[in-house]
Image: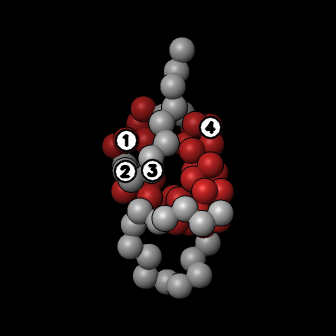
Amino acid sequence: MSGKSEKYTRFEIARIIGARALQIAQGAPVLIEVKEKGMDPVRIAQLEFAAGKVPIDVKKK
């Protein structure tokens, strides 16, 4: 993934991608250019995360 993924655990990454995929599946705008029509929301969320465009952050205590 990107350098941004270094600050998250693999569990946080899974949660972020899952939450973003749900948003996309429910009609949220996609923040990257999608070349394939009908691409899986999870794949789109993974690509957004890799590009550093996911508008979700994890607050740690």
Residue at the limit of the structure toward the left, as seen here: 3
CB under 8 Å between discs 2 and 1: yes
The colour scheme of the drawn protein is secondary structure
Question: The residue tagged with tag 1: helix, strand or loop?
Answer: helix
Labelled disc at residue 54: 3
Residue on which disc 2 sits: 52
**38 and 47: which one is in front?**
38
Residue under pointer 1: 4
Q: Earlier in the sequence, mark 2 or mark 4?
A: 4
Marks 4 and 1 sit apart, C-alpha to C-alpha, by 14 Å
Secondary structure at numbered mark 4: helix
**Residue 59 at x, y = what percent?**
51, 25
Question: For the residue marked with disc 4, what is the amino acid?
Answer: Phe
N-terminal label among 2 and 1: 1
Which image quarter: residue 35?
bottom left
Kindly identify the residue that appears in the image at 48 percent across and 36 percent down: 57
Of callouts 4 and 1, which one flags the residue occurring earlier in the amino acid sequence?
1
**Residue 40 image position (x, y, % from top left):** 61, 72
Is residue 50 visible in the rendered structure shown here? no
Of marks 2 and 1, the one in the foreground: 2
> Are dots 2 and 4 in contact, CB under 8 Å?
no
Q: CA distance from mark 3 to mark 4?
A: 16 Å
On screen, residue 28 versus residue 48, left or right, reads: right
Q: Residue at x 44, y 47 (%)?
A: 55
Q: Is residue 45 visible?
A: yes
In the rendered structure, which amino acid carries the disc numbered 1? Answer: Lys
Of mark 3 and mark 1, the one earlier in the sequence is 1
Please rate how many residues cluster around mark 1, counting C-alpha atoms within 10 Å: few if below 14, some from 14 to 19, many from 20.
few
Q: Of circles 2 and 4, which is in front?
A: 2
